[in-house]
Amino acid sequence: MIVFPRALLRPRSERWTLKGVALNGGVSVGGLSPVSRTDGGGLWVCEQNFLLATPAQRKAGRALMAQLDGGAATVEVPRFVGDDGPGGTWSMDYSAADAAALRATALNVTVTVGLPLTGGEAFTIDHPVRGKRTYDVATSGALTAGEQAITFRPPLREAVTTEAIDFQTPSCVMRLANPDEFMSAMSLDRTVEVNAVWVEAFDAA
């Protein structure tokens, strides 16, 4: 797996969205318009914008572009959560309290070290087969006896038992979707702009 140069490439902006497929059955006699999902919860698409201003940043950008092999290879793309994580302490310890099935959207979380979850946090589970996958907390219950019930999206990409849950450095296995537009031409002040569009990938590379 390619190692993303996280220390050198920190985006000026990023957007994570779940792109899904929904079927609309039309408007019924009663005026309802039923919509159903057919995609298992959608695929993550991430858009990141970087400004490479130093030689080290420019070389890291070119090296990453070469390793991505025109979008054929996969990389664990980091989510730069900042202050949106649980926070409170750098030492955090969260894990699944019990098993959850493939495509589950609810989980009991053991909070060993860290603040209670409030909803809106991003986290990653490093699945044995699917690798690192990112999820967003939708709702959270009260923290009781060191455990907290949460719901999240998208559905689990793989069943879990008691895997660790990473709120500090969430990331997702993805593929570059726009290799031809990844890096701009170098400007007169020797800066290079990078506009990356990443799509969640499920096949190994």
Image (tube, rainbow, N blue to C red):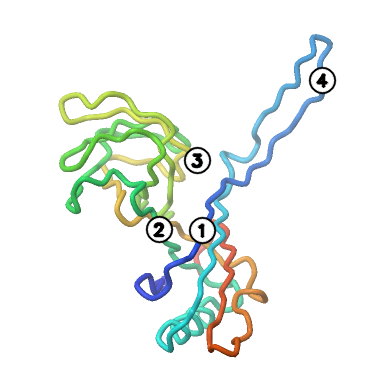
What percent of the width, then of the height, locates residue 194? 56, 74
Q: Assign a secondary structure to mark 4.
A: loop
Q: Earlier in the sequence, mark 2 or mark 3?
A: 2
User: Where is 205 relative to 191, above or below?
Assistant: above
Write down the residue under mark 4: 27
The number of callouts visible is 4
- Image height of 152 relative to 205, above or below: above
Point out which mark residue 79 bears.
none
Which residue type does callout 2 highlight? Phe
How far apart in space, not on screen, are marks 4 and 3 (Cα)? 27 Å
Q: Nearer the viewer, residue 194 or 20?
A: 194
Tell me how far mark 1 sits from mark 4, CA to CA: 36 Å
Give above or below for 163 relative to 97.
Answer: below
Q: Which residue is mark 2?
A: 80
Amino acid identity at mark 3 = Pro
Residue under the image location 35 percent in, 30 percent down: 150
User: Where residue 176 sits in the image (x, y, percent)?
Assistant: 58, 68
User: Where residue 154 is drawn, which disc sits there?
Assistant: 3
- Image quadrant containing the N terminus: bottom left
Q: What residue sits right under mark 1 in the picture?
A: 14
- Residue 173: image location, x then y, percent: 46, 60
Q: Earlier in the sequence, mark 3 or mark 1?
A: 1
Residue 121, horizontal then vertical, whole percent = 38, 42
Q: Earlier in the sequence, mark 4 or mark 3?
A: 4
Q: Name the residue type under label 1.
A: Glu
Mark 2 or 3, closer to the camera: 2
Q: Residue at x 59, y 72 (%)?
A: 71
